[in-house]
Image: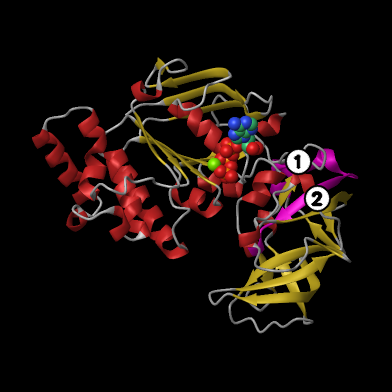
Amino acid sequence: MAEIVINGLTKRYPNGFEAVKDLTLDIGEGELLVLVGPSGCGKTTALRMIAGLEEISDGDLYIGGQRMNDVLEKDRDIAMVFQNYALYPHMTVAQNIAFSLKIARRPRAEIKRRVHETAQLLAIEEMLDRRPKQLSGGQRQRVAMGRAIIRQPQVFLMDEPLSNLDAKLRVQMRGEIDALQKRLAVTTVYVTHDQVEAMTMGDRVAVLRDGKLQQVDTPFQIYERPANLFVASFIGSPPMNLAEAAIKQTKDGLTVSLGEAEIAIPHELAARNSLDAWVGKSVIAGIRPEDIYEVTRKTAKLQAAMQVKIDRVEALGASLLGYFSVDAAAPRAESVSAIPAEEVLSEAPLTGTSGTSFCAIFEPRAMLKIGDTTEVALDLSRLHFFDPETDASLLAEDEPEKKKKPEAKKK
Ligand SMILES: Nc1ncnc2c1ncn2[C@@H]1O[C@H](COP(=O)(O)OP(=O)(O)OP(=O)(O)O)[C@@H](O)[C@H]1O
Ligand SMILES: [Mg+2]
């Protein structure tokens, strides 16, 4: 077990491309930190630098207090699990799991004992004599985990270990890996581009974009207080609705005009976002799909209601997604995360002809159809505001618990 301290880590490839830029992160002893971001943002590069498979161009790496920059991969006491778990096809499961101990010339009796303990932990005892091709994808993944666990390393590094599995198995395995990591309490860095995986597994989540760290925090804080437009649009599915909005001063306080709606902002929310400074200016306002309600008797008390015309509906069983257009400009495309093709549920364009497409999660039995006009209300306490120039959240930090590191949004 060991703490990982990453200080200004940078990777410049020989062609001059900077894949990781000045990455600073502390990963606590026994913590599971998830590194998440879109394809090509530098996740694998960062992990390979920690593993010692890639030279560090700049910055320092410490594991368990020891500077590791110039320590060889084999001397870092790290086990890595890759996406293509590369089992040896001609070896049995037991031999695959035992491999590293054999190389390390451990006594036979010890190898046998540890293979059995590991197999037991992973519920693959009955498969020890099989070869990899006689296993299912999930079972192979467990063998790959077994090879890493048996070494009892001080650090686990996992690079999209579940991406070869089908959706259902992925959900099961992520639960298993999570439970296993908690039980072994080995410091772990887990890389994924899947934001759901990141949110469900991580003690903390670090969001990377173009080699730069955007935010690192607990899944809850990342969701509730995204530091900028990129994190706001990357984490959450369907993503947060975002549109340009004007802040105005009225005699009763501040309002935000979102399309045709003029919404009074609760005083406390205005204060937390220092909106006084934005009177007469445009901000980017955000609201998550689950914070928009159809106005019924239950919700009628919320004041910020607007009339919308439903462009598209998607019945998902447990909920119903309704799309409608808000007459306001969308944020610049480069500020937000493009939704990966596999996650696009709808053809609804981000920017419609008459404004920006918003999504709301309605009750599953809301009888909405395309073309219906309905009244929706926003949960005002859950509005987000961002600076349209810098993309940073306007939310002031919680002073008491926030620690040392200045966050990206201060810049
Ligand atoms: N040897 C190399 N030389 C130059 N550029 C490279 C090299 N290896 C990777 N890159 C670039 O560095 C960037 C980061 O690559 P990396 O593999 O770390 O991304 P990733 O976040 O793991 O992406 P994915 O989710 O697709 O696995 C990419 O733009 C990639 O093209
Ligand atoms: Mg990768």
Disc with the residue nearer the chain's start (2 vs 1): 2
Outermost residue, front side: 90
Residue found 40% across the figure and 19% down from its top: 72
Q: Is residue 98 magenta?
A: no
**Three-letter amino acid code at disc 2?**
Pro
Give the residues drawn in magenta, as a range: 267-289
Density class for disc 1 (Cα within 10 Å; few <14, some 14-19, many ≥20) is: many
Closer to us: 300 or 355: 355
**Three-letter amino acid code at disc 1?**
Asp
Q: Secondary structure at mark 1?
A: loop
Residue found 24% across the figure and 30% down from its top: 103
Mark linked to residue 391: 1
Q: Circle 2 is placed at which residue position?
A: 331
Q: Is residue 271 magenta?
A: yes
Instruction: Calculate the distance from the C-alpha at mark 2 to the C-alpha at mark 1.
Output: 9 Å
Q: Residue 408: where, in percent of width, then height?
A: 66, 32
State which quarter of the image contains the C terminus: top right
Q: Residue 385: where, in percent of width, then height?
A: 74, 47
Outermost residue, left side: 109
Asked if ligand 1 lies within 8 A of label 1, the reply is: no
Q: Residue 306: where, in percent of width, then height?
A: 79, 69
Asked if residue 67 is positioned above or below residue 105 in the image, the reply reads above
Asked if residue 126 is positioned above or below residue 47 in the image, the reply reads below
Does the CB distance between marks 2 and 1 fall below 8 Å? yes
Q: Residue 59: where, in percent of width, then height?
A: 56, 18
